[in-house]
């Protein structure tokens, strides 16, 4: 008995995928791959992997093959099914960079959805959080980073995703897969720095070559500084009331002197000489860990509390990485090749951008849960919108409640500085 034909307009899960269909002709020209009896195109791989992204159960090539054999997927790709061997071949042979124009177009549409942070309203530059995360690979993958982990010092092959996140719209702007050729996070990011933005980075980026490259691009940085970094204080700035309210201990300007030793007269590190421009060190008290946090920046004309607020926004990329690895299951690469992993990363970027555009809200585990329910026919689009609005309202009220509680609690002011 022939399978019943399903009308495209009645398939809820296509409400998002339809947004990329105008790209079919561009992504199908000259980027196909033949394997057996299949003629698979990049647009077909994109549609199948997007459908898999929105279904938390589909996290292997075998399940993607099963998904592709469903009637509604056959109508989109024109293929009876996407066999595992065909998909594996495509992930190694397709050029993921062909998806970049689509990512840029979607990112431009998402930018208008981000609400401006009132604490950072005075900043005219785009704020980007940069960080890397590791994916475990099979031991025989030669191009991967090799490291030893655990008490048994067992060797582990890993790939690193180097990501840049727009903190206002909570969307990925850049993604790159690193292997043996990029052992240092900071060195890898030098290759993809943007001009005219503010970078928020952690202590792993205390790398003089990286700092010099950011400044050369005409960008700024706010980073957590290691206590071992030599900073020569030239001036101590006076703190305002809001600085003290946000637990700022010291606001100092000066220069990086570099490591000191008798044999290192130029005070160079292993990477480069320290930048010679005037910098700023803002010291913040962290009550949760009962310790000082030192922030280094080249932003000299904003209040100290803005530097602290900026660095706290860096945590957004940690949340996004957790979303990618746990909720979206990006921690399980579908391919062993750098091209295949990059393609999977770009599909995840496109999927989150489409989800952001479809719901009008920043991507989260809640939006992914609801869109999966809609795709499975267990909820309507209207129910999803109501559910997401309710969750957003509850989270806003909870943040306001915690803020009031903090302001009313005794003894929560900034730690008194001894300087």
Image: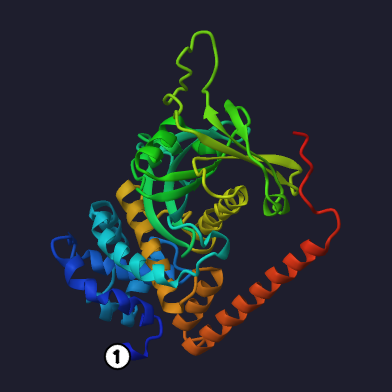
Q: Specify whether 161 is left or right of 69.
A: right
View extreme (top): residue: 262
- Residue located at (56% from left, 58% from top): 319
Q: Is residue 141 visible?
A: no
- Residue placed under numbered mark 1 in the picture: 5
Q: Nearer the viewer, residue 369 or 228?
A: 228
Measuring 58% from the left and 26% from the top, which residue is drawn there?
A: 232
Q: Quadrant of the N terminus?
A: bottom left
Q: Give the quadrant of the C terminus.
A: top right
**Is 182 left, or right, of 301 in this rendering?**
left
Question: For the point 43% across and 39% down, which residue is it?
Answer: 139
> 10 Å neighbourhood of mark 1: few (<14), some, or many (≥20)?
few
Residue 102 placement (x, y as % from top left): 28, 65
Which structural element holds mark 1? loop
Q: Is residue 69 above or below residue 265?
A: below
What scheme was used to colour the molecule?
rainbow
Q: Position of residue 90 (x, y in %)?
A: 25, 57
Q: Is residue 157 above or below residue 314?
A: above
Question: Is residue 126 at least partly visible in the picture?
Answer: yes
- Which residue is drawn at the image coordinates 49% and 74% (left, top)? 361
Q: Residue furthest left?
A: 30
The picture places residue 308, in percent across and down from the top left corner, at 61, 49
> Quick check: 29 above or below 372?
above
Residue 172 in the figure: left or right of residue 386: left
């Amino acid at each position: 008995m022939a399978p019943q034909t399903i009308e495209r307009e009645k398939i809820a899960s296509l409400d998002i995928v339809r947004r990329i269909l105008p790209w079919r002709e561009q992504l199908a020209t000259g980027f196909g791959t033949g394997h057996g009896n299949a003629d698979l195109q990049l647009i077909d791989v994109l549609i199948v992997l997007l459908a898999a992204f929105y279904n938390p159960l589909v996290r292997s090539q075998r399940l993607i093959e099963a998904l592709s054999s469903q009637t509604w997927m056959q109508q989109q790709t024109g293929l009876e099914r996407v066999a595992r061997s065909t998909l594996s071949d495509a992930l190694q042979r397709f050029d993921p960079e062909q998806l970049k124009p689509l990512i840029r177009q979607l990112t431009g549409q998402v930018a208008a959805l981000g609400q401006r942070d009132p604490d950072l309203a005075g900043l005219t530059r785009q704020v980007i959080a940069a960080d890397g995360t590791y994916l475990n690979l099979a031991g025989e993958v030669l191009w991967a980073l090799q490291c030893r982990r655990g008490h048994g010092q067992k060797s582990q092959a890993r790939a690193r995703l180097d990501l840049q996140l727009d903190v206002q719209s909570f969307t990925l702007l850049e993604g790159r897969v690193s292997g043996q050729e990029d052992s240092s996070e900071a060195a890898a990011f030098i290759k993809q720095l943007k001009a005219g933005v503010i970078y928020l980075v952690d202590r792993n980026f205390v790398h003089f070559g990286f700092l010099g490259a950011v400044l050369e691009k005409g960008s700024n940085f706010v980073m957590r500084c290691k206590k071992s970094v030599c900073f020569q204080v030239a001036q101590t700035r006076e703190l305002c009331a809001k600085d003290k309210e946000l637990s700022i201990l010291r606001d100092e300007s000066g220069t990086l002197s570099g490591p000191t030793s008798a044999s290192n007269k130029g005070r160079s590190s292993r990477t480069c000489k320290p930048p010679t421009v005037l910098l700023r060190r803002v010291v913040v008290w962290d009550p949760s860990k009962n310790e000082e946090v030192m922030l280094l920046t080249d932003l000299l004309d904003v209040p100290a509390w803005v530097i602290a607020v900026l660095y706290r926004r860096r945590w957004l990329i940690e949340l996004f990485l957790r979303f990618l690895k746990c909720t979206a299951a990006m921690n399980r690469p579908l391919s062993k090749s750098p091209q295949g992993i990059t393609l999977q990363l770009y599909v995840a970027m496109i999927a989150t951008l489409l989800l952001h555009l479809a719901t009008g809200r920043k991507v989260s585990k809640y939006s992914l849960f609801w869109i999966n329910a809609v795709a499975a026919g267990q909820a309507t689009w209207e129910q999803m919108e109501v559910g997401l609005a309710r969750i957003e309202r509850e989270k806003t009220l909870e943040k306001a409640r915690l803020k009031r509680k903090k302001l009313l609690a005794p003894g929560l002011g900034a730690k008194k500085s001894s300087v």
